[in-house]
Image (cartoon, rainbow, N blue to C red):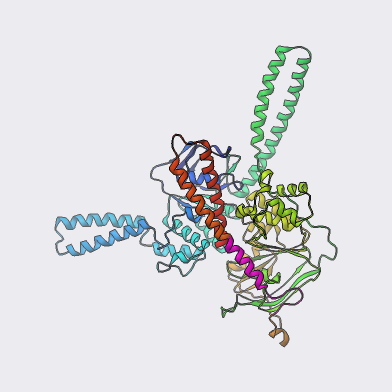
């Protein structure tokens, strides 16, 4: 039975057709993964369904009394009630029920009175409505949902305005799933979740009684949740049955068949062009015109069939293999001996007794729940944080490169092209070619860094970093801002990279494809596993085998500094990075305020005489706001 119909929806921004005659249905029991490259128009379709954006053609049909719950990537678009965990409608239903209970109590002395019977009927309806909303077990289900999403100690007494952006988004997700709408529409719900929370959400959604329609780049998540995949490419949608793995198999078979079709059409077109030319040379004008019509028809068919192969202008295509390296593959680049870390204001250790080695060409992935110390360990290995027990040895001959979750640039006013050329000896032609591989094409290379979205900043930073060809590549969640196809290109490059890699990631497809070993965190320590599957099984079975302790000398026991290249944290550098982060936040907030005011002025001016340029400006401002909200959430989390 259909719950929602998207009927021939089209919308164009800046002369680019984002959605072109998009049509499909969401039925009862559907678990749909909506995929496509960044900027393809997925979130725009969500907004059209929600009613915040009007399509230029087509319509959205809700069948019956279908209730849809939305989770947006941007908190500004989210219905976040910062004062209570309960939705307003449930609070009102509870208040109405309690008011009736008090009225009935006052009338109990006269149970035969018409007023008493009327109030009892009214009360029965109020109880039924409250029960239908899940009011009686709402607190229990909310507590269970919050715990599953990694939030504890949050109840109605908590000031929700003090939560971080990521915590607020998880509260919104919990409120949404507990309210049990007919369709859950979720835009990147795994963005702020660690692996444990993602696995809980997967199980919940897979068994959810209503329909699920989710935008996601997490392929493992799609595999575990979806029974349909809808791909948006070049404004058109294609539907596939099954999960992500099934989608890949079906699409590969389709692409192979489609490429053969295009090849055959190209051959036939070339033949018909030769025949047409022969008829012209033989003065067979009638035959020439007939062939000309056939050629035109073939060209139209060929263009239509080529379009089915897709067009992905933003897909990253790069090679990050460094120069040929010399030396033994088993050469130890980093050696960690029994390290433990705690912060001055915390009596408990963040983690204890971690020991491992990183060899040349080895790829170790750090995995574990949020807050377990993965990123802290990464900065310790880079020599940017001291104050820990144990020792870390780093090869003096090894060069390193680092990409964190926040990517700073010294000068935000210069262009992408200037940034890359300033950090390398590339010519302009070579630099533009390299930037194109990272999705910066044509005029995009002249964008100033200060106007880039969070994803664009990450791509530019990675592009510059890889030109340094480090022996050890440190990565902290490198796939966060990439679409599926770009993630797959990155995975292939990391897998073929002939240097060493230490990477923090929650992307299970990425981990399983590229990792040689897993340094898995559990119970305030970490140990190496050969496969990610073995690490997750140890967590699920509550195996708490700790890494073996190393007996330390008295000298080592009193030492809280690293050896070799590892030094105490550069406090000045830390303050500089934090100052840049806060400065960027202020700049974004100012720009958002200016754009929102401009949007309100434009909306007030819209009418029959509104020019097309005004609508284009409104659309352009909307895209800028979306990118700014996304970056602000990342910086504020």
**Of 472 and 419, which appears nearest the observer?**
419
Q: Quadrant of the C terminus?
A: bottom right
Examine the structure image and report whether residue 579 is included in the region drawn in magenta: yes
Q: Residue furthest right?
A: 326
The answer to whether 12 is drawn above or below residue 43 in the figure is above
The answer to whether residue 550 of the structure is visible from this angle is yes
Give the total number of marks visible in the rendering.
0
| Numbered range of the magenta stretch | 561-583
Examine the structure image and report whether residue 125 is included in the region drawn in magenta: no
Q: Position of residue 115 (x, y in %)?
A: 16, 56
Q: Position of residue 352 (x, y in %)?
A: 64, 77
Is 111 left or right of 326, judged from the image as shown? Answer: left
Is 568 left or right of 237, judged from the image as shown? Answer: right
The answer to whether residue 189 of the structure is visible from this angle is no
The answer to whether 410 is drawn above or below residue 564 in the figure is above
Q: Residue furthest bottom?
A: 554
Q: Position of residue 193 (x, y in %)?
A: 55, 61
**Of 172 and 520, which appears nearest the observer?**
172
Q: Position of residue 372 (x, y in %)?
A: 60, 70
The answer to whether 344 is drawn above or below residue 242 in the figure is below
Residue located 53% across and 46% down the image = 621
**Of 450 and 13, which appears nearest the observer?**
450
Residue located 43% across and 43% down the image = 604
Asked where in the image residue 331 lies, by quadrant, the reply is bottom right
Q: Quadrant of the N terminus?
A: top left
């Amino acid at each position: 039975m259909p719950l929602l119909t998207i009927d021939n929806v089209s919308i164009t921004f800046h002369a680019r057709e984002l959605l072109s005659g998009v049509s499909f249905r969401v039925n009862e029991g559907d678990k749909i993964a909506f995929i496509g490259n960044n900027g393809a128009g997925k979130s725009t379709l969500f907004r059209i369904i929600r009613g915040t954006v009007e399509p230029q053609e087509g319509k959205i049909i809700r069948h019956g009394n279908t209730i849809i719950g939305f989770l947006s990537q941007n908190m500004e678009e989210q219905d976040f009630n910062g004062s209570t965990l309960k939705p307003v409608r449930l609070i009102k239903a509870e208040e109405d029920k309690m008011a009736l209970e008090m009225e009935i109590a006052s009338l109990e002395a006269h149970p035969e009175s018409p007023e008493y019977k009327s109030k009892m009927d009214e009360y029965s309806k109020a109880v039924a409505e409250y029960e239908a909303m899940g009011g009686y077990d709402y607190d229990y289900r909310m507590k269970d949902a919050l715990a599953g999403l990694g939030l504890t100690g949050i109840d109605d007494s908590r000031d929700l305005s003090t939560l971080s952006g990521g915590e607020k988004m998880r509260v919104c997700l919990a409120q949404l799933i507990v309210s049990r709408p007919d369709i859950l529409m979720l835009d990147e719900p795994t963005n702020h979740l660690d692996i444990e929370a993602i696995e809980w959400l997967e199980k919940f959604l897979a068994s959810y009684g209503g329909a699920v329609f989710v935008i996601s780049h997490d392929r493992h998540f799609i595999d575990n949740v979806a029974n349909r995949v809808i791909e948006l490419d070049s404004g058109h949608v294609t539907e596939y049955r099954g999960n992500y793995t099934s989608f890949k198999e079906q699409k590969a078979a389709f692409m192979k068949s489609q490429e053969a079709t295009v090849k055959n059409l190209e051959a036939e077109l070339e033949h018909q062009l030769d025949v047409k030319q022969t008829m012209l040379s033989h003065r067979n004008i009638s035959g020439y015109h007939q062939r000309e019509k056939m050629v035109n028809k073939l060209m139209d068919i060929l263009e239509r069939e080529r379009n089915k192969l897709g067009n992905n202008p933003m897909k990253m295509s790069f090679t990050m293999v460094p120069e040929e390296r010399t030396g033994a593959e088993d050469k130890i680049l980093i050696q960690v001996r029994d390290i433990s870390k705690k912060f001055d204001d915390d009596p408990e250790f963040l983690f204890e007794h971690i020991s491992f080695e990183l060899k040349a060409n080895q790829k170790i992935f750090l995995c574990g729940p949020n807050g377990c110390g993965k990123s802290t360990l990464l900065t310790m290995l880079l020599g940017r944080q001291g104050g820990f027990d144990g020792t870390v040895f780093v090869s003096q001959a090894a060069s390193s490169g680092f990409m964190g979750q926040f990517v700073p640039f010294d000068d935000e006013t210069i262009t992408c092209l200037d940034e890359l050329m300033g950090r390398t000896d590339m010519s302009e032609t070579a630099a533009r070619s390299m930037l194109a591989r990272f999705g910066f094409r044509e005029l995009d290379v002249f964008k100033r860094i200060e106007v880039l979205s969070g994803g664009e900043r990450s791509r530019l930073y990675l592009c510059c970093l890889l030109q340094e060809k480090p022996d050890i590549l440190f990565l902290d969640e490198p796939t966060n801002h990439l679409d599926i196809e770009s993630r797959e290109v990155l995975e292939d490059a990391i897998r073929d990279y002939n240097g060493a890699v230490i990477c923090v990631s929650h992307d299970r497809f990425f981990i399983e494809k590229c990792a040689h070993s897993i340094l898995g965190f559990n119970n305030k320590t970490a140990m190496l596993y050969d496969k990610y599957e073995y690490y997750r099984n140890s967590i699920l079975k509550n195996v708490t085998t700790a890494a073996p302790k190393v007996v330390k000398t008295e000298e080592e026991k009193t030492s809280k500094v690293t050896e070799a290249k590892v030094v105490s944290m550069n406090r000045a550098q830390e303050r500089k990075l934090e100052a840049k982060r806060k400065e960027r936040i202020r700049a974004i907030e100012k720009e958002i305020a200016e754009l929102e005011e401009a949007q309100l002025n434009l909306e007030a001016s819209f009418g029959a005489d509104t020019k097309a340029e005004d609508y284009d400006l409104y659309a352009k401002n909307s895209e800028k706001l979306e990118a700014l909200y996304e970056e602000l959430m990342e910086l504020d989390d």
